[in-house]
Amino acid sequence: MLLPSKIICAGLNYKDHAKEMGLTIPDEPVLFMKSPTALIGDGDKIIYPSATKELHYEAELAIVILENGKLGYTCANDVTARDLQRKDGQWTRAKSFNTFCPVGPKVVTDIDPNNLDIKLLLNGEIKQHSNTRQMIFNPAFLVKFILEIMPLFPGDIILTGTPPGIGPMQRGDTVEVVIEGIGTLKNTVA
């Protein structure tokens, strides 16, 4: 299991997602953080907290900082309490409940992160489908940008944004993030 000192996230980082939301493409990455205590692995349960009535999935490519500054990649689900995100205006609470950052199933280093098929299945039905070439800011740029703000340590995780098609999950649902060359991150909602 990864033990990050921090989980940094890029919001609104897919051109097709920005278009879907009717938002202007940012000229710099929009960053926020998730608590490291939100981290869970492949097969673990996402707990639907009573504080929200609108739990959403967001398929993402995650960058993992490895020893000697090398980068690895894995699947992630940026679980979000969408109603709390709208209510608060900033995103810490909505993104940081326990179990709100599933990652896995493994970290790989031998892929090109700039051209990967990415999709999310909810109960076997495709809800999100895009390619990482749709990213506004690619993984190498995000790492460089973040390093100008703060240090990154081995185990730290960067979520790179989600493609279009975000939507709700309910208790009992099975959610799968599938990324070409990495595999499938599968979790159920409890």
Image (tube, rainbow, N blue to C red):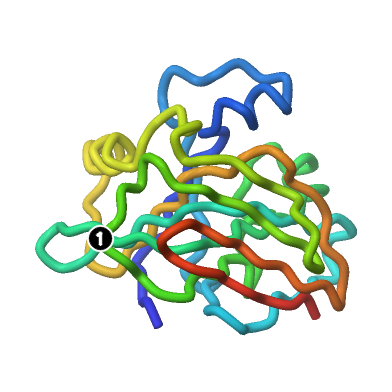
- Quarter holding the N terminus? bottom left
Closer to us: 83 or 129: 129
Answer above or below: position of 20 versus 150: above
- Estimate the x, y position of residue 94 in percent, counting from the top left: 69, 54
Query: Residue 59, percent across and down?
Result: 61, 54
Residue ID at (77%, 75%): 189
Looking at the rendering, which quadrant does residue 44 occupy?
Answer: bottom right
> Which element type, helix, strand or loop, lies under badge 1?
loop
**Where residue 91 sits: x, y (%)?**
63, 46
Front residue of this view, candidates 177 and 87: 177
On screen, residue 179 versus residue 53, left or right, reads left
Dot 1 corresponds to which residue? 110
Vertical order, 59 against 86 (above or below): below
In front of the other: 186 or 10: 186
Identity of the amino acid at label 1?
Answer: Asp
Residue 100 found in image quarter: bottom right
